Image: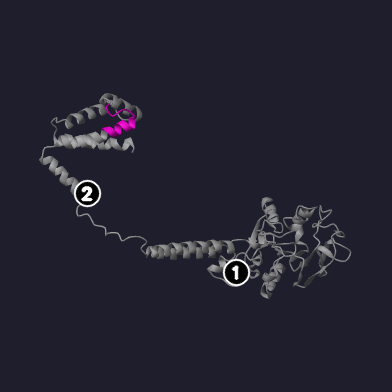
Amino acid sequence: MKRKASAILLIVSLFLLVVALNFVFFVDKRATGEENEQTADRSSYRSTLYGTLALYTLLEESHYNVTRFEKPFTELKDREPGTLLVIAPPDTHNPDQEEFEAVNKWVEAGGLLIVIDRDINVSIGDTAVHTEHAELKSTVHTLQPTPLTRGVERVALSEYATRVKVDSRAATYHIGDDQAAVVADAQVGKGRVVLLTDPYLVANNGISQADNVVLALNLLAGRPAGTIAFDEYHHGYGASTTGGGLMAYFRGTPVPWMMAQVGLIAVLVVYSRGRRFGRPLPLKRERRTTNLEFVSSMANITRLAHATDLAMENIYAEFRKRLCRFSGVPAKVENEKLAAAVARRSKLDERELATLLARCEGVSRGEQVSESELLKLVARIREIEPRLGS
């Protein structure tokens, strides 16, 4: 009894541990209201107020060739993707120097890089970009008519929007104030860089405000051939930022903890199978004869005793019961009525079935029958039985 109680206690403990793991690791803390306009996750996987799933879905449903880029920038190719959107990656996952060099080469080779962030301080090719914090919400306007400002009369900004300054002769300011821009772009080699200093304009809670959605689509004006890719690698999706391997591939998903739970269940199964919870059971005794040997012996005894009527009586009685159940008639019904009822519900011939029933009934009452005829009668019964169901 003590062993049984300890085993039950172990099972309950493991169950509670699994539940605790689910609460600790499966709850997405980024979706619990702890986000705000400054610390939010801007991933295109996010349907929260601050995510950018709405923009991704809009492009997808507008038949743009859109995808998610879940690799470091060192995996960028010359023509694929054609456009890369980098939207406010968290500080913990900012690109390293090697990635900056790779994205520089990719832009100079003809790629379109769209950077949407409040803090931008980078050099792309010969173009230096930095942002300045200022009160912009009521002073921003269209600076000149360009493809990026087509159809844009007013944009809605958050209170955290910044100005961007681009140190390049090939730079163009599109929307801003008298000192700097909120939207700017610059030619870099064969490619181009577009800069937007407020992620609110493309976030789920801001893209529908004023003409923000028009501006979001205009950012893709003049894009090169190829797919439009959202950078998700620097939001923690896809390959690990700290290493490779199978577990790195599943990082950020519940899969590792699912594996841990499977391991705990396996341990529980091994433990429970290796311990006895009840009284000892006697060893199973193997039968010394087979079913075929029993049937052969009974058939031989019946033949030697000339008891064919007894053999037929056993087979016929069970067969007749099944026919009655199948046709829904009483057990004492006459053979002709039984045959008619069965024929109505099946494709069996009424006359043949009536003849079979009459002959089997006669043999079971002691009428003479040869072994070959008896075999034929039983064989016909076995042919009919499968049609009667259970």
Which range of residues does the magenta coloring cover?
320-332
Question: Which quarter of the picture shows residue 105?
Answer: bottom right
Please tell me which residue lies in front, 177 or 368: 368
Q: Residue 240 shows which numbered tag?
A: 1
**Is residue 108 visible to us here?**
yes
Decide: is 303 above or below 125. above
Q: Residue 291 shows which numbered tag?
A: 2
Q: Is residue 157 magenta?
A: no
Please tell me which residue lies in front, 345 or 60: 345
Instruction: Give the CA distance from mark 2 to mark 1.
Output: 63 Å
Eye-nearest disc, 2 or 1: 2
- Looking at the image, is mark 2 or mark 1 earlier in the sequence? 1
Q: Is residue 263 left or right of residue 104?
A: left
Quadrant for the N terminus, please: bottom left
Q: Position of residue 71 (x, y in %)?
A: 62, 66
Q: Is residue 51 left or right of residue 176?
A: left
**Is residue 220 visible to us here?**
no
